[in-house]
């Protein structure tokens, strides 16, 4: 196989050529082609013969370094990334499946992601819409919050380390510079990309999640404005500006940027830690507020940011982890129904069930009102729970404008064991609640009949 192409995956982008007369191997993995290379590693697309799935393999070549101290530091970074194999399992983080570090053959086996880094979309002639940037940054916040809970601070957040999959999905890659707060080991200082470093990172102070918050703020600035917040000719000038100068707002370069986004970027990049976002949730919530004030009421599309926040607020999903909520978001269909719109018709065939993300619906039997369901309630689930019954037994009509989460049982069956388990728990909790309500109603009816009989 011969050819040449520009590949962007797992954070590497390079024009490469390959010429494999026979299938090469790294360990058990069959090499398909080279994807790209850097100073100390080369990335290949490979096939895992046991799972029959494509993976990306990062093969290290630390020994190529002439400087012994630099080679030692590179090996430490390599070992840091390898130590995270199987640790970070989040839909917006590139998974590391396996690591081999025996000196003779050093490599990582990672999830293969088809897509490109955000570098191109941080250039002035390829900028993404404001809403898309806000959604991407929101997903980064949730992914890095998850990493923080696992005791990991990335320390090198920048567009080159964020992969764009499709139009809106992202995956954060390259945790070689990560600080592992849960481990009692000496960490390498001075790692990262100077333009995206926080003031405390430059000063080599103790780091928290706020250093990644700063770096993500710079990333957001670059993706909105198409240029870095500090224009410096050398690293000395850059460091001085990071430590002492306030950058112009994004709107100075992109006038259509609303004040809310300007404020979010500025707070994320505050030099004073007390003025910067203290947590990822604060950062994410400001992005949610931006959507609610500027996007939600004016768009037919329901953004993932709105979906995730809606799922997080519903009692039905209260025991779901963030990772499971992202899975629900991927397997569900979302739509809005107008007042008096019929959602389900009695007697029709159907297996899907619905959860109300917002609004109110009426449940009717032969035109008679049975119940009114509100935000967080579920309906249509009996066709799923009975497994064989697919004929709807009631009408469901929107009483107000509603947002519906529709889930097909066939799709749910393909989800993770943990996700299905949480659905089963929620269904049991919901059925128990309905049974309690029904028993209470029956008790009232019997009591009324007894009282009526006594009067007669």
Image (tube, grey):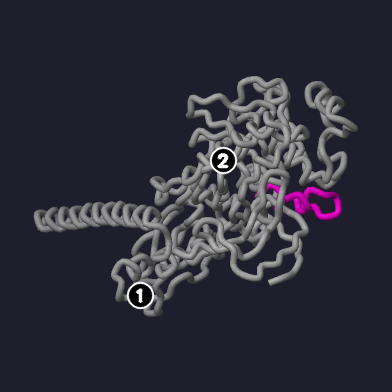
Residue 25 occupies which quadrant of the picture? bottom right
Residue shown at 82%/44% (left/top)? 225
Q: Marks 2 and 1, how far apart in space?
A: 62 Å
Mark 2 or mark 1: whose residue is earlier in sequence? 2
Relative placement, left or right, of 416 versus 306 is left
- Please tell me whether residue 184 is drawn above or below residue 419 in the rendered image: above
Residue 283 occupies which quadrant of the picture? top right
Considering depth in this image, is 197 or 364 the residue closer to the camera? 197
Residue shown at 83%/31% (left/top)? 247
Considering depth in this image, is 299 or 281 the residue closer to the camera? 281
Residue 366: assigned label: 1
Q: Residues within 10 Å of mark 1 (few under 14, many from 20)?
A: few
Pointer 2 residue: 81
Predominant secondary structure in magenta? Answer: helix
Secondary structure at badge 1 equals loop
Relative placement, left or right, of 303 versus 158 is left
Q: Is residue 361 visible?
A: yes
Q: Residues within 10 Å of mark 2 (few under 14, many from 20)?
A: some
**Residue 176 x/y as whole percent:** 61, 39
Residue shown at 68%/29% (left/top)? 69
Considering depth in this image, is 219 or 253 the residue closer to the camera? 219
Q: Is residue 285 visible?
A: no
**Does residue 250 show up magenta in the picture?**
no
Secondary structure at badge 2 equals helix
Q: Are marks 2 and 1 in contact (CB under 8 Å)?
A: no
- Please tell me whether residue 410 is drawn above or below residue 253 in the rendered image: below
Q: Which residues are magenta?
A: 118-135
- Please tell me whether residue 348 is drawn above or below residue 17 in the rendered image: below
Name the quarter where the C terminus is drawn. bottom left
**Residue 48 x/y as whole percent:** 50, 62
């Amino acid at each position: 196989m011969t050819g040449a192409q520009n590949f962007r995956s797992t954070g590497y982008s390079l024009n490469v050529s390959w010429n494999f007369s026979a299938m090469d191997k790294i360990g058990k993995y069959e090499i398909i082609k080279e994807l790209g290379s850097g100073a100390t590693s080369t990335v290949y697309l490979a096939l895992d013969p046991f799972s029959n799935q494509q993976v990306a393999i990062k093969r290290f070549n630390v020994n190529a370094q002439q400087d012994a101290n630099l080679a030692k530091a590179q090996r430490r970074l390599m070992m840091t990334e390898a130590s995270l194999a199987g640790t970070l399992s989040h839909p917006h983080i590139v998974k590391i499946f396996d690591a081999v570090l025996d000196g003779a053959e050093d490599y990582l086996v990672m999830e293969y992601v088809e897509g490109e880094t955000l570098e191109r979309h941080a250039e002035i002639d390829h900028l993404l819409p404001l809403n898309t940037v806000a959604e991407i940054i929101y997903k980064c916040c949730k992914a890095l919050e998850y990493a923080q809970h696992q005791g990991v601070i990335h320390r090198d957040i920048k567009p080159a380390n964020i992969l764009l999959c499709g139009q809106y999905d992202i995956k954060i890659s390259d945790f070689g510079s990560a600080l592992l707060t849960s481990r009692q080991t000496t960490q390498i200082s001075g790692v990262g990309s100077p333009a995206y470093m926080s003031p405390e990172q430059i000063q080599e102070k103790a780091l928290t999640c706020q250093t990644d918050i700063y770096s993500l703020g710079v990333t957001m600035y670059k993706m909105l404005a198409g240029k870095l917040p500090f224009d410096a000719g050398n690293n000395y000038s850059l460091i001085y500006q990071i430590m002492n100068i306030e950058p112009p707002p994004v709107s100075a370069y992109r006038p259509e940027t609303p004040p809310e986004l300007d404020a979010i970027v500025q707070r994320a990049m505050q030099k004073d830690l007390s003025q910067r976002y203290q947590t990822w949730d604060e950062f994410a919530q400001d992005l949610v507020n931006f959507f609610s004030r500027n996007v939600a009421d004016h768009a037919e599309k329901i953004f993932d940011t709105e979906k995730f926040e809606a799922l997080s607020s519903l009692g039905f999903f209260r025991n779901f982890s963030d990772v499971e909520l992202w899975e629900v978001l991927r397997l569900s269909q979302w739509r809005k129904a107008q007042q008096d719109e019929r959602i389900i018709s009695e007697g029709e065939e159907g297996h899907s069930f619905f959860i109300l993300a917002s609004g109110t619906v009426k449940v009717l039997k032969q035109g008679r009102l049975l119940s009114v369901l509100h935000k967080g309630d579920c309906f249509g689930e009996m066709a799923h729970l009975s497994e064989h019954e697919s004929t709807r037994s009631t009408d469901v009509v929107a009483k107000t404008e509603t947002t519906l989460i529709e889930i097909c049982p066939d799709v749910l069956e393909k989800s993770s064991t943990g996700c299905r388990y949480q659905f089963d728990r929620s269904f049991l909790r919901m059925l128990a609640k309905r049974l309690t309500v029904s028993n209470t109603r029956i008790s009232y009816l019997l009591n009324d009949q007894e009282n009526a009989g006594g009067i007669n």
